[in-house]
Image (cartoon, helix red, strand yellow):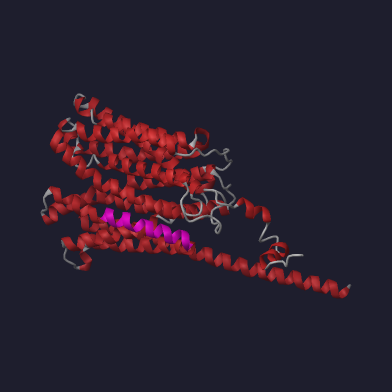
Amino acid sequence: MKRKPTRFHYLQTRCKFYFPGDVLVKWNLQPGDGPPGSTGHASTWLSREQLFVLISAASMNLGSMMSYSILGPFFPKEAEKKKASNTVIGMIFGCYAVTELLASLVFGKYLVHIGAKFMFVAGVFVSGGVTILFGLLDQVPEGPIFIAMCFLVRVADAISFAAAITASFSILAKAFPNNVATVLGSLEVFSGLGLVLGPPIGGFLYQSFGYEVPFICLGCIILLMVPLIMCILPNYESNPGEQSFWKLVTLPKVTVLTFVINSVSACFGFLDCTLSLFVLKKFNLPAGYVGLVFLGLALSYAISSPLFGLLSDKMPRLRKWFVVLGNFITAGCYMLLGPVPVLHIKSQLWLLVLILVINGISAGMTIIPTFPEILSCAYENGFEEGLSTLALVSGLFSAMWSVGAFMGPILGGFLYEKIGFEWAAAVQGLWALTSGLTMGLFYLLESSRRRRAKIHNTLGTEEERTALLSDEISS
């Protein structure tokens, strides 16, 4: 008895362009299969491979951010004892961002040659060792030798972090091609947690046991992660691509998005070097309570990032609105941080904390969609869908973040000395406002161009149909 064809069979046979059988077989339940943006047949449950990737990336984010933030409470004081000036201490902190900028571009270019897993593991291993070495710097003679060793260790730490984070972004995008923003946003919880836990834990260990113990303990914990990551992290192989950073960054949309990344990073860097001084001077808080003021910013960013990542993946059309609106909200927050004197609003502690909480949310709204936006733009402009492109995008993202992290504190410190915190924060807000206006204008032009192209294609199709009908009638 002959089976009656089903509706799906009819569509599959009549519309081969839309339902090719070989594609339906290839897009099965394998993790990481299929091009980004594909939907449908994958299970909503995480595979073991994906779970291992998440564990590795989360542990790296937590350890690296704790290692980065642990210096704040007590290193400047120890450096002053070793005859390091405030300017030199600022340069020790600033060299981290410059080194990460250069290293990210190099690692992004050669990740496929080095290997994503090897770069990730090596970065974590070096980071653990360097953190321990930082704890031994108090044994170094004061003066130029101490300063030189601080720069050397800090540069090595930045290189290791650049290697680990560039490889991490690439592996995550490979393992979760359809949920890049969701995964990156979720992992920001661990980054925020590391930034929140680093200063209080480091300060407690420093007060209880001295300078060496915080770094040695954290470094040993990071080193203990290395065997675990080596065992569970999958190895992704790929052929080197022909694209370059220059071709990627000269795409107009990518250029504007890198400006947005710089803006968000610079805003964070501005607060790092100015907010604590302003709070101590304005509200006469004890030094121990200053860290609690930063807590609102870190927690709101960490909590909101997964939500914006999920929305960016489920509704990609919202990404551009998130980026533009997030910049505008950030600009408003920096106008109110002081607040700027022209508003005639009295500065109050509760208002400052509230603005920081809103700023954390707006930062997550702005920065999380930028990575998938750059990735989709690269694919639309002929970049191959593979690990080489993911590495380029990861390296570019990390490098542009480092540019802002370097410029923010320098500009913030200079403006704070010249015009005070209130006006300095307003100037920083203008940076966010400018990036939001630039991004919004670009999206309007892009939408207009696509609409004209659609109308042109429609008219061209109608003309072809008219010509075909005329030929048929004449024949």
What is the residue that sits farthest to the front in this orientation?
1
The image shows residue 252 at horizontal and vertical percentages of: 51, 54
Inspect the magenta stretch and tell me whether residue 302 lies in it.
yes
* Rendered residue at 52%/44% (across/down): 246
Compared to 1, does 284 lie above or below?
Answer: above
The image shows residue 365 at horizontal and vertical percentages of: 37, 59
First to last magenta residue range: 297-315
Observer able to see residue 363: yes
Observer able to see residue 411: no
Quarter of the figure that contains the C terminus: bottom right
The one of 234 and 194 positioned closer to us in this rendering:
234
* Rendered residue at 23%/37% (across/down): 89
Q: Image check: 294 left or right of 365?
A: left
Q: Quadrant of residue 163?
A: top left
Compared to 228, does 61 lie above or below?
Answer: below
Q: Image check: 365 left or right of 339?
A: right
The one of 121 and 417 positioned closer to us in this rendering:
121
The image shows residue 182 at horizontal and vertical percentages of: 43, 55
Inspect the magenta stretch and tell me whether residue 386 lies in it.
no
